[in-house]
Amino acid sequence: MVYLYPLPKRMVDSSHVLFESLPESWQHELADLHANFSEIETLLIPGQYNPEGKIFAALTVEPRDVAVVLIGQDPYPNSEHAIGLAFAVPPGTSKLPPSLRNILKEVESDLGRPTSLNQIVQWPSQGVLMLNTHLTCEKGVPLSHQKFGWQNIT
């Protein structure tokens, strides 16, 4: 199961809400980057970015349990697809993004059997950190937050 770490609908000026919404184990690991989170927080406008309330969904994997890191660019730019895990979409999604279709095809080729979307969403429980380089983007605009400083954290 994936647990989400929602942000409050309204961020207070320089309140450190973003850093404090990290899972506790990741707060410890990323403590030296606290200032980077504060800078990004000042740039985010609640309700205008993906994945609202799911920014740190990838960090359900405890730092000590990370075995593989799968790196994506940024969240899918639409609310229907963006769930906070690189390349993953909600189960039941009918039209899959091309990048995810390619991953499913490669996994199927490697394993010699079909792989379902449900299996990919379960990868974090197997130690796969499905992390985007940029953890947010403006809805409908890929790479719109590439200069926010996420790469200093990820």
Image (cartoon, helix red, strand yellow):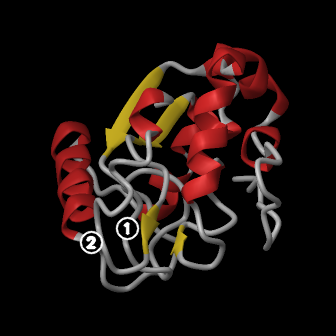
Q: Position of residue 132 (x, y in %)?
A: 41, 45
Q: Which residue is mark 1?
A: 76
Q: Do tag 1 and tag 2 residues touch (Cβ < 8 Å)? A: yes
Q: Position of residue 50 (x, y in %)?
A: 51, 69
Q: Which residue is mark 2?
A: 97
Asked if residue 22 is positioned above or below residue 9 in the image, the reply reads above
Q: How many marks?
A: 2
Q: What residue appears at the point 77 percent right and 17 percent down from the top-left corner?
A: 28
The three-letter code of the residue at mark 2 reads Pro
Residue nearer the viewer, 26 or 99: 26
User: Which tag, 1 or 2, sits closer to the chain's start?
Assistant: 1
- Residue 19: which quarter of the image? top right
The three-letter code of the residue at mark 1 reads Tyr
- Judged from the image, the secondary structure of the residue bearing numbered disc 1 is loop
Left or right, residue 106 beside residue 70: left
- Judged from the image, the secondary structure of the residue bearing numbered disc 2 is loop
Left or right, residue 146 beside residue 99: right
